[in-house]
Every structure is written in structure tokens, then in C-alpha cells.
Image (spheres, rainbow, N blue to C red):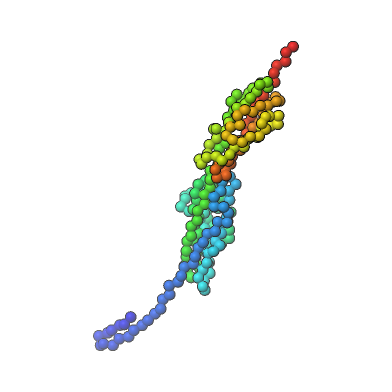
Amino acid sequence: FPVTILNGCWDTAYKKIEVLAHPVAKIQIATKDTQCYRGHKYVYKSTGSSAVTSSTISRYNWVFDYGVSPSTASPSVGLGKDSFGVTYSTSGSKQVRLTVKDTNGCWDTAFGKILINKHPMARITIKDSIQCLRGNLFTISASASTSVIGFSNYYWKYENNSSPSVATGISSNNVKYNTIGVKKIDLIVIDKVGCNDTVSKNLEVLDHPKSL
């Protein structure tokens, strides 16, 4: 930048500046990014994050439920490049944020998304759940079960001495028992993304009176 004074003399000075490149933040989801709610756990890593030549990443800041207050994640935040096992208290779509800072003071941010699917609800309906032994025939259905995305299958299991002893489908319809007593029915429902729910219900088969 030249400087001129009143007597016409001048001088020039120069100084260099340097614009530094930013590091690169990357999120690796080491588990499946879509899971069912029960038993879910997400592992996040900073694998692939990098700093420019002559610099290293000095800080990793994680927010596991970004944009939500209060956070549904446990833990809600993290430090360091190591992986994390994170769980959530609600289902739905979640956003993860990673901010990295290098030894030059430059930083970068990356975002990732995961989805936690809600489980279906299994329900058993029994028409006339108490019957006498002779001629018993129980009509059993899963039609009261609910799912936000629909079902892919239904699995039924009955106690011994029943016909049938197992079944599939929304309705097992006619089930017959050849012994008396309280009988347990188990139903597993699976929705279209593989999430499941289980429910049990009892019915009773009564003995007949004895004539004298």
C-alpha cells in the first residue's frame, strides 16, 4: 500500500495473510440407521473426519438429538472421536450433529439422520372365551391389533391338546381343545418393517356335569 506525503516522497509496505482450509467432519453410523424401538442402540463414529496437512483435529463435539429440547437421547451429547452407544426415549426421526475443530482453530460440522420405528400392538379377540368341553370351538382373531404401517404376518401358538396347535394369519378361527382347563394363547405380530409385539390371553374349557 503506497503512502505519499506532501513533499512527494513515498514508500510501500507488504504483508502476507493466509487463509486456512477447514477440517472435514464425517459421521459414520456403525449400526443400522433404522431400528425398532425396543432394544435399539445406535453407534456413531467420526471415521472419515480429517484435518488439513500440518494440523490435527483437537476437538469432537457430538449432539445426538440435535434441534430437540429437552433431548430424548441418552447420552444427549458426547466428546471425542470414539464410538457411542446411544438410546432414545421416543420413536421417530432423529438428527445427529458432529462438530470438529482442528489445531488451527478452524472447524466443520456434519449431520446424520436415523429412524426409530414404533412397534405394532398385538391384541387377541376370543368369541365365547368360556365353553364346555363337548362341542367346543373357539373363534380367535387378531383383528384388533394395530400398526401405523400395516402387518406382514401373525404367528399363533396354543397349548397342547388343541387343534391346531400353531397357526398363522390374522385369524386362526376355529380352535378345538380335547381337555378341560385354562388354556393360554400366544400371538406374535410383525409389521412391514420387521418390528414385532407379543401378547397372551387365556380361555377356559369347562368339564361337563356327571349324571347319577
Residue 56 spot, x, y in % from top left = 53, 69
**Can residue 37 be spotted in the picture?**
no
Point 66% across, 26% down: residue = 176
Q: Where 153 sits versus 13, above or below?
A: above
Point 58% across, 51% down: residue = 41
- Quadrant containing the N terminus is bottom left
In the image shown, does 113 or 131 lie closer to the viewer?
131
- Quadrant containing the C terminus is top right
Q: Residue furthest left?
A: 6
Image quadrant assignment for residue 17: bottom left
37 to the left or right of 1: right
In the image shown, does 151 or 181 lie closer to the viewer?
151
141 to the left or right of 67: right
Residue 32 spot, x, y in % from top left = 57, 52
**Can residue 212 be spotted in the picture?**
yes
Point 58% across, 54% down: residue = 31
How many discs appear? 0
Q: Residue furthest top?
A: 212
Q: Where 160 sits versus 38, above or below?
A: above
Point 70% across, 16% down: residue = 209
2 to the left or right of 50: left
Residue 48 spot, x, y in % from top left = 54, 64
